[in-house]
Structure formats: C-alpha cells, structure tokens
Amino acid sequence: MTLPINAQNVSIVSVEKINKLSGENVKLCMQCGTCTASCPMAEEMEFYPRKVMHLSQFGLLSEMEDINTYWKCASCHSCSVRCPRGIDIAKVMEALRQLVLRTSKNYIEPSEMPAEQIKELPQIAMVAGFRKLTS
Amino acid sequence: MKISYYPGCTLKLKAKNLELAALASLQALGIDVEEMDRWNCCGAVYSLTDDDLIHHIGPVRNLVRAKERGADKLVTLCSMCYNTLARANQLMRKDQVKRDTINRFMDDEIDYAGEVEVVHFLTLLEEQVGWDTIKKKVKKPLTGLKVAPYYGCTLQRPQAVGIEPMGSFSLMTRLLEAIGATVVPFYSADKCCGSYQVLNVEAGDNDAAANVINAAASAGIEALATSCPLCEYNLGKQQDQFMAKGKITANVPTFYFTQLLGMALGVDPEVCHFELNDSKAVLLLEAKQIQVAA
Ligand code: SF4
Ligand code: SF4
C-alpha cells in the first residue's frame, strides 16, 4: 500500500503533539529499522515500528488511527535500548496510545474479559494491561 | 543498615510461592528485612508519558514510606515492581522540576529526593550474603537440574535501572551455580514474554512466550528460573494451551528462583508452594529426585 506524504496530510501540530507527550524527538529517526528488528511483537503488528516512526515524523495521525501497532506494543524497551539515534520508541508508542485513550476510548473492554481468565491472571497483568489499553 | 521490603500486590495473592520461598531463604541465610507496615500498589508499569505525573505518585509514596522508616534500601522481588520503583526513584533523583511538583502535590508527606536505594533481591543476595556463603549453606544441591535464568524485560531495561548490564545474566547464573544446578546459556533470557499483552490475545495465542519456550527447549534447558509473576504466568501457566495449539512441542517448566534457592537451603518444601506452579514443574523436580513434599 502506498501512503502519500504531501502538504495536505503532513501535520506539524501532530508531530509536536507526539514529541510533547513522549518527551522524544521523532525527527531524529533515520529509518534504519533496528526497532522493528528488535521487536518481539512485530509479527503481529499491522505496521512495523520503523514505519510508525516514519509516519510520526510527518504527523500522519489519521494514517495510524486504525492500526494495531501501538496496541500490540508490550513496552518491552527492546527497541529503545538499541535505537542508534537514542530515541525511546517505547515512549513514542505510549504517546500514540495516549492520544486515543485520552478521548475516552478503550482498546480492550475489562467487562468482556472471561471470568476464568480474570481468576487466573496475576494482579500485575491486569494493572499493567488496564493502564496501557484502557482509558 | 536498614533494609525495607516491598512485596507488591501479586506476591500476596497469585505469587505466594515467590515471596514465601524468598523470606524462608533469607531466614536460613540469617538476613533480616522488615516488610513495610504500609505500602500500596506501585502501578506495575512506569508511566512513559511526559506530562503524566499522577501515575508516579503510587511508586513515590512507597519510597516516601521507606524513607520515613529510616530505610537505606528498599528491596523488591517482583521484577515489575522493581522496575517501576527504581524508575520512579531515578526520576525523583534526576528531574528537579518534576520532583518539586510531585513533592508539592503530596504536601502531607515528607519531601523525597531519591534518598532510598531501590534494589532487587538478587542484588541483595550478592551484596549482603555472597555466592560463596550461599554455596556453603546449601543442604540439598540441585545436582543435575539443567536450568537457565530468564530475566525478561524489566530486570534489565532501560539500562539505567538494569540490575546488571544488558546481555549479562550473571547474578542469577551465579546463584543457580551456587545451589548446585547446571546453568545452560540461554540467548533468549531477555526476550519479552509478551507481558500485559496476554490480556489482548486468546488463551494460548501469546506467540512471544511460545517463542521463548521453544528457544529454551532447543537449547536443552529443562527449567527456567524467573523473578516475575507475569513471566511465570505467560511462560509457565500457558504451556498446556500452547501445546494444544501446536505452538510448542516440549514443556519447559518455570520456577521462581527463590523456590529453587529455598529447596537447596533445605527450606520446608511446603513453604515453596510448588502446587502454585504449573503441574509440570513438580513432575520435573520429582524426576530429578528433588523432594517437593514435606
Ligand atoms: S531504531 Fe531508531 S533510528 Fe532506527 S528506525 Fe527505529 S526509531 Fe528510527
Ligand atoms: S517497546 Fe514496543 S515497539 Fe519497542 S520492541 Fe517492545 S513491543 Fe516492540
């Protein structure tokens, strides 16, 4: 799929939003792909982390609206510790999640989780999961 | 030196086997730690958003409690608690603006600037006891058990709070060697088990964890040792489902390193609560003639 990057969809405001929330500078990314290569969840992601970094550099939030990348991110920091440009990509993923969660949208519905699973899960799984995936 | 102990929520409920085996081992080693009389949930994950300070209040409040009691160190067992508390501590040490805001917000508490040191139980064992002493105190060495340390993410990343440099697993390796086990090199020891993503997939579909099990099995590893209840759940408790879905072909039981330490030090096996592990864990110990019932 070709994603057009042009004056109509590039948004400096969105780049600033991502940078402000993450505390990082996405413009530093040189598109080497080390983050994708380090990511244990990459296989399940619709766009790989490198591509998400590229779209973030142009503030293409609408192109990233329906992808699962940042919802599949496990905040494992494998990418962050290896990025040759020193970007904490885990923080960029968190910023993208927060941009959605702060509009009161949930990615998973706690009330729909099977009772059996809730009974089994360790507490840290639920606390962490709800913090990352619900608003 | 005063050492405060922070257990965290999971250790009081689902991961009693991690905590009770650790406390009994400390007793056997003659080390005194005091559980904090008041503590709250650390939040399990460190907030990664730059403008979100409210989620640092939980971990910082625990650090304040430790400082109030005059503790020099705060020791934790759960890897996720360790990471969250250590990162919050670092924030309070390094970021003056955020520190001031957080201290002002908690105006009913004493000010905190990172005075307490957050340490993981493995570091405590190395510093306060030493591997040679542990070796001397071993009553039932775990001879013949081929085990590998599994650190997962939160004991090593980010580097600033890692219990040792990335790619080095020497603390747990030296502990396992001291208790007589055979340590097998494991190149997936810091690969993510999928963490909280287990909430986001059907049972048995957490491929990140299945990949770790497969890597362990093909390295000839019989058991993994961990310090994280979420790793233990994702790796240990899901193996029947992975098997049913054809994602793994061999079982690799998962233990808390404290359970293995406890067994070697001659702690009552009942205290190590192996019934809380995956059933394959007990079968493996029995096959190795390691007594699991009192
Ligand atoms: S590793 Fe860093 S520089 Fe390389 S593509 Fe990823 S974010 Fe960009
Ligand atoms: S932090 Fe997220 S994006 Fe980075 S490697 Fe881990 S799962 Fe992938």
Image: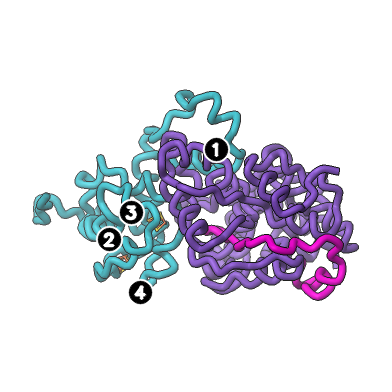
Q: Distance from label 4 to label 1 (Cα)?
A: 33 Å
Q: Are marks 4 and 1 on the same chain?
A: yes
Q: Residues within 10 Å of mark 1 (few under 14, many from 20)?
A: some
- Across and down, in percent, residue B11 comes to 71, 44
Residue type marked 1: Met
Q: Distance from label 3 to label 2 (Cα)?
A: 10 Å
Q: Specify the chain shown as cyan.
A: A
Q: Distance from label 4 to label 3 (Cα)?
A: 19 Å
Provide the residue designation for mark 4: A84
Name above or below for residue B193 compared with residue B218: above
Quarter, ligand 2: bottom left
Tell me if B193 is positioned left or right of B103 in this view. left
Q: Which residues are magenta?
A: B125-154
Label 4 sits on a secondary structure element that is loop
Output the chain of dot 2. A
Label 2 sits on a secondary structure element that is helix
Label 3 sits on a secondary structure element that is helix
